[in-house]
Image (cartoon, grey):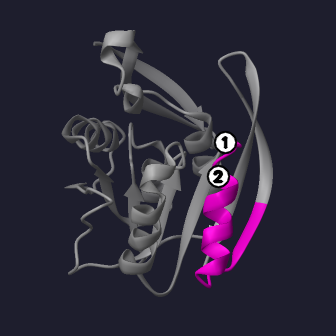
Amino acid sequence: MEWMEENVQLGGQALRFVLARQFSAREEGQYWASLWPSAWVMAEALLEGASLEGMEVLELGCGSGLAGLAAGMRGATLTLSDVIPGAVELATGNLQRNGLEGEGLLLDWHEPPTDRQWDLLLAADVLYDERHFSALMNCFQQLLRPGGRVLLSEPGRPQAREFFADLLRAGFRVESQVREVEMYGECFRITLSEIR
């Protein structure tokens, strides 16, 4: 995979990211090394929202770390997690490039840690494969402190409806809004949901 450093304007600030220049069909699975519209919308929402000072925040499936970086800019104590070691390394490196600190954590949703919880879980574009839905739901239940919340963004994948129905059946409350973002010459409609 080829890498490039890109300057990105987010929330009126210039940020530096290392990202994949491109990836081929042989490198399928390297999708985590890009900026995705769902993460962008989440990052914008975090920057528009209240301070996260004093909150412990975990980004699930961090990829390049964009949403986590926004949480760090709002004062969160940050943990960036992914099942892919290269993603954790990329995301923590992107934090450091922008003068922020955070912990990297290898985390498989099917085997989440049992000794830690966070105030806020960030999950951007994680509903791509329904085989992971029960594990992701378990992460929400196990990793979220009492009174905590999940911020989830997704681009309208058909299978996401079933996950949201499962959340409601499990007793979660979900408030959603649709936001639009223009990236890569296209307009994307992203559903941003707060889950408690």
Location of mark 2 (residue): 160
Is residue 61 within the magenta segment? no
Is residue 169 within the magenta segment? yes
Identify which residue is drawn at 27% across, 67% down: 112
Asked if the residue at tag 2 contacts the one at tag 1, i.e. Cβ–Cβ closer than 8 Å, the answer is yes
Q: In the image shown, does 177 or 26 lie closer to the viewer?
A: 26
Looking at the figure, which quarter contains the C terminus? Answer: bottom right
Q: Residue 20: x, y in percent?
A: 37, 19
Q: Residue 161: x, y in percent?
A: 70, 56
User: On residue 181, which mark appears?
Assistant: none
Q: Amino acid at mark 1?
A: Arg
Task: Give residue 3's quadrant in the image.
Answer: top left
Circle 1 residues within 10 Å: few <14, some 14–19, many ≥20: few
Marks 1 and 2, how far apart at CA: 6 Å
Is 42 displayed left or right of 28 in the figure? right
- What segment is highlighted magenta in the picture? 155-176
Circle 2 residues within 10 Å: few <14, some 14–19, many ≥20: some
User: On residue 157, which mark appears?
Assistant: 1
